[in-house]
Amino acid sequence: MIRIEPRAKVSNSSTIFIPIIAAIVSLLFAAIPIISAGANPLIAYVEMAKGVFGSVFAVSEMLTRATPLIFTGLAAAIAFRAKLWNIGAEGQLYLGAIAAVSVGSGFFDLPAIFLLPLIIVLGACAGAVGMVAPTYLKVRFGADEVVTTLLLNFIIIIFLQMLLEGPLQDPMGLGWPQSAPILDQGMFPPLIDRMRVHSGLILAVILAVIAHFMIKHSVWGFKLRAVGENSSAAKHAGININRSLFGVALLSGGLAGLAGVSEVAGLKGYLTADLSPGFGYAGIVVAMLAGLSPIGVLIASVFIASVFVGADSMSRAMGISSFLADLVVSVSLLCVLVGGFIAKFKIVRAGTGKKIL
Amino acid sequence: MEASTVLKLNGLAKRFGSILANDDVTIHLQKGEVLALLGENGAGKTTLMNMLFGHYLPDSGNIEIKSVNDDFVPLELGNPSAALTAGIGMVHQHFTLAENITAFENITLGAEPLFSLRRNQRKAEKKINNIMSNSGLEAPLDIPVGRLSVGERQRVEILKALYRDAHILVLDEPTAVLTPQEADALFSNLRRMTKQGLSVIFITHKMREVLSFSDRLVVLRHGKNVGSMETSNASEKKIARLMVGSETQKVFPKRITPGGPILSLNDISVAGRSKRDSLQNISLTLKSHEILGIAGISGNGQNVLADLISGLVLPDKGSILLKGVAIQNINPLNMIKLGFGRIPEDRHRQGIVGGLSVSENMVIERLDDPLIQNFGFLRSSVINDNAQTLSEKYDVRGPGIDQASRLLSGGNIQKLILARVFEQQPKIILANQPTRGLDMGAASDVQRHLIEARDRGGGVILISEDLDEILGLADRIVVMRDANLHDVNSSSREAIGLMMAGESV
């Protein structure tokens, strides 16, 4: 029998090498289905790398994909730090997007310098609103926020579908369930000419850095960490738990809302019910990979976006099924998560206590 | 002599990094004896027992246990189930019970198949009842352990070991949670069982118990066996000298005439599910220059009282008066601002946030203080300087002020809490079981600070199960029982002990 014990100290070299080893192992594992699909894995991986780093366009695509992941990753990381399990980033993302198209598609005809900030602020507020009810139910009645936030996702998406067939439907849209486009001055300016990567990325990076700084150096962050680590002691020490939870909840919802804003006002221009291919849920994976650190979220988002975009372009270039891309993504995620586990825990033989790994 | 030895620990050594936790420790346990294992916190007692139970692998040395045919077989090292099957039972200081299942289920858990016939369950119940009547250790079997008092939980722990037919029983700080009468009963029951062949190792700090109940004692210091003697040859002075290397001075508080009342609880009731988590029409007055000792077995409402004074629980009825003025906003922050210093019972759960650093835990109660923060941002240099100064002043030792506070030992966690509380010069101090589980050095530090606070003019409410501590420190004593406070006229330990147990005097 084996036993799992926490490592006394996570060494510096292991934090660098374990992710690298995990990445290599994941490539080895992913080679199996690639070979069985009749392709040469080496060429496939070269194609994959080209798809991520091979050109300015490739990098731009990868960063475009990373942008919403940073927002939803931050939303999850901050909430999870306080042990508030917000699984509702997907719904909050759509709330942010709804707010963005509501004010951005002609309701206010303002110059860019006013309209874009207005869209950002209202989108964040709308996302935050999505957390009010779950947090109130948790604080007041002890309702499990995992359940309430998760179920709200479906409610919000159905609500969105109703809006897209009704008040938000584009009158020029030939009856498609999509919103009117956001005015040009309400869009995030692109970062590179004729590329898709937009300045929403800058906002995401700035927010990650601010979040990192706030968690470490502000009284607010101190309270958040205290509540998350040991809420009884925090309460005993005079920290208002409910207030902290509400603050974190609103912020988390707001960040998730910004993911929707950035997708709508940075990329698509209009809102449809398939705006997000699960960015809200992927944000949870990002946050866990990042060890709930905001700076880690930046790295994890880039990693996951690279795997997504790289695997996609590989399957196109090699003519193999695009489902294989999903498989590569899942295998590499599992490998990195196992690697993170091994970095934190050691495996010993139960009988002798001899270290195996 | 050799013929009756049942367990041999031979030259055990264990090193953790730069610390030699156990250094060539040899102990032989005789059949039917009570062996006391003494030592300061960090002397290596727990490490030694953890090697016996296979939780740690010794760096050198071995363990032999007498088998049925009277020869010694080596115990498989590093395997917890080997110790269990060899008939060694352990009762930990921090209980290892599942709180959401009943005592019966806890006792049989792991010893019996998960799904057993009702007939087998009845058999198990019969066995437990048998053990209970033989040992005198009574505990309700059919309610979840989470609702039992600490004392009852400990009895369940002992029953659990005995149920597994242990013939060697290791008890870590067994009496910390018992009344003197209960402790006496426990030891006389243990005595009865040792006559039937049980061998007992008990780890303790309490001299009185060692001297009156053990047959032999072994003292550990810095991981070494520094002395072992027959208890009949030992004295308190001798043991203390061995434990700390020199004789320690016992705290003898100077009695001061108390001043005017500073805190009054007026006819306060708190509703709870049972008597252990409620208060019934409690009135209490604390004067300045006074240590008020609240004696009692845990689970009689002490924690509700502590939570009330800490601001965690609101009274359903009655009021709290501070110098004659009713406190309006009862919440932890307001209580801290009004000058309450609180030392919680459960240091790990309520006292510190283990994941935060030592320096952060030292300022966690004064985050509003402009010394600590600037426009909502922490002044880390001030916070670190504060931690550096306080660590030296209060002798908090650990891996560093910037390290997670959970890495500190129990005694150092308590010193951290003392530093945090007493640096604010509190007017009223609530100390709930402040020395439980601490070694003599740390415990006397705690007591010294309580006395200093009293001498400065503060009022101290000392809730403790350790009657010796209450008798030594308190200027006035009340007994808490069944969610109520009872005045004490006599100061004899017997009379107070009887009141704690519920007898009218």
Image: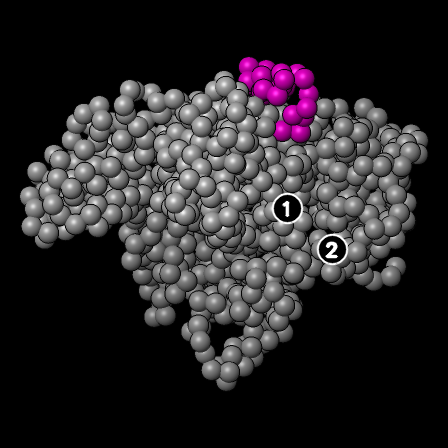
Above or below, A200 against B131 in this view is above
Q: Is mark 2 on a helix, strand or loop?
A: helix
Q: Mark 1 lies on which chain?
A: A
Quarter of the rendering occupied by the C terminus of chain B: bottom right
**Point 65% across, 60% down: residue:** B147
Q: Point out which mark residue B277 bears.
A: 2
**Point 18% across, 38% down: residue:** A313
Q: Which sits in the foreground, A147 or B398?
A: A147
For residue A174: magenta?
Answer: no
| Residue count near mark 1 (Cα–Cα under 10 Å), binned few <14, some 14–19, many ≥20 | some
Above or below, A265 against B139 in this view is above
Q: In this view, does A259 lie to the left or right of B98?
A: left
The segment highlighted magenta reads: B364-389
Q: Which sits in the foreground, B297 or A147?
A: A147
Q: Where is residue B451 in the image (x, y as percent from the top left)?
A: 76, 30
Q: Where is residue A18 in the image (x, y as percent from the top left)?
A: 26, 36
Closer mark to the observer between disc 2 and disc 1: 1
